[in-house]
Image: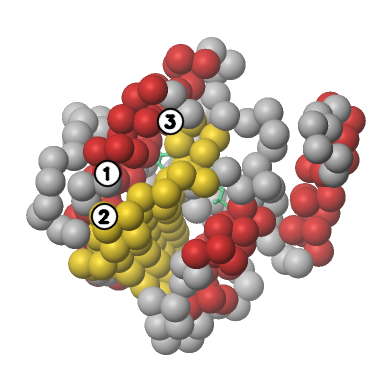
């Protein structure tokens, strides 16, 4: 792509179609798998044998990708309001139907503790920027409550968040809980999207202060 070249609506639609078609051909139910793949290529997120918790897993692309990466000795637990499409014969792939905002992290304890917690949670969007940012923030804070309860020391947390000043505060506070926190915008993300990903590497349990006002249990 030429420098300074802005994608037109048509170009973007073509690119979206390309990713969606490619995902279907590869056996993934959603194109979002390419965001995870891109982050994984850069950060080597997975190791064979790892336990992975995938929050907001439906329709199931991230869970399927994670299951292939952790292999037969590993395990993936997906959680969503909706059932995920996880029928590809992966033996160590489990799913739970629950509302993350009201359910307790204890629900996932039998499969944990986890080496990696993924959150691609997205709210139903209203079209009003501030409302959607606030809903996204509530979800990511709930995801963090789960991650903090269920991650192994040294584990990693990958989360999606809509960009906002409060979202930046959240990621800044998280730096006290991890050796390193990076913000990422994979190329497979739609250019008009306000979503961004945060990656906390090397969980340090019990350290620092992090605002956990999440709505969970409220
Ligand atoms: C972008 S989709 C995830 C796509 C998934 N990573 C994949 O690759 O197939 C976001 C998901 O978050 C889920 N979600 C939103 N709010 C939730 C909540 N309160 N509890 C559980 N899941 C929720 C939605 O049902 C939706 O399936």
Judged by depth in the image, the label closer to the viewer, 2 or 3, is: 2
Q: Nearer the viewer, mark 1 or mark 3?
A: 1
- In the image, is 69 to the left or to the right of 10? left
Q: Is residue 74 visible?
A: no
* Image x and y of residue 180, in percent: 32, 55
| Residue in the picture at 76% in, 67% down | 26
Tell which circle, 1 or 3, labels the residue nearer the N-terminal end.
3
Residue at screen point 27% across, 46% down: 175
Q: Which residue is drawn at 42% across and 49% down?
A: 182
Q: Nearer the viewer, residue 75 or 81?
A: 75
Residue that protrudes farthest toward the front in the picture: 3
Please provide percent x and percent y for residue 56. Answer: 46, 47
**Marks 1/3: CA–CA distance:** 16 Å
What label does residue 136 carry, if any? 3
Q: On the image, numbered disc 1 is attached to which residue?
A: 174
**Residue furthest bottom in the image:** 73
Horizontal relation, residue 183 to residue 18: left or right: left
Q: Say few, some or many: other residues with alpha carbon within 10 Å of mark 3 (under 14 / 14 to 19 / 20 or more).
A: many
Q: Is mark 3 within 8 Å of ligand 1?
A: no
- Residue at the location (68% across, 47% down)? 187
Q: In which quarter of the image is the N terminus?
A: top right
> Which quadrant would residue 53 be assigned to in this image?
bottom left
Pointer 2 or 3: first along the chain: 3
Mark 2 and mark 1 in contact? Answer it, CB < 8 Å: yes
Tell me if I can see residue 19 in this picture: yes
Tell me, yes or no, whether the two marked residues, 2 and 3, touch with CB atoms within 8 Å.
no
Disc 2 versus disc 1: distance between alpha carbons?
7 Å
For residue 47, above or below residue 128: below
Q: Residue 30 carries which label?
A: none
Circle 2: element type: strand
Residue 178 badge = 2
């Amino acid at each position: 792509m030429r420098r300074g070249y802005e994608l037109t609506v048509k170009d973007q639609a073509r690119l979206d179609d390309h990713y969606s078609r490619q995902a279907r051909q590869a056996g993934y139910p959603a194109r979002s798998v390419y965001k995870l793949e891109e982050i994984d290529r850069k950060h080597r997120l997975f190791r064979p044998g790892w336990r992975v918790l995938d929050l907001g897993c439906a329709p199931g692309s991230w869970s399927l990708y994670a299951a292939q990466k952790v292999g037969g000795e590993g395990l993936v637990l997906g959680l969503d309001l909706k059932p995920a499409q996880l029928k590809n014969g992966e033996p160590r792939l489990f799913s739970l139907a629950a509302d993350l905002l009201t359910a307790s992290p204890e629900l996932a304890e039998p499969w944990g503790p986890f080496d990696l917690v993924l959150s691609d949670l997205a709210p139903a969007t209203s079209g009003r920027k501030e409302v959607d940012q606030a809903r996204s923030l509530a979800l990511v804070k709930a995801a963090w409550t789960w991650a903090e309860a269920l991650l192994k020391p040294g584990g990693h947390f990958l989360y999606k968040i809509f960009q906002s000043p409060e979202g930046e505060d959240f990621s800044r506070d998280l730096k006290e809980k991890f050796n390193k926190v990076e913000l990422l915008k994979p190329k497979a993300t739609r250019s008009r999207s306000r979503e961004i990903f945060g990656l906390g590497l090397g969980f340090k349990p019990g350290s620092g202060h992090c605002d956990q006002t999440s709505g969970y249990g409220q």
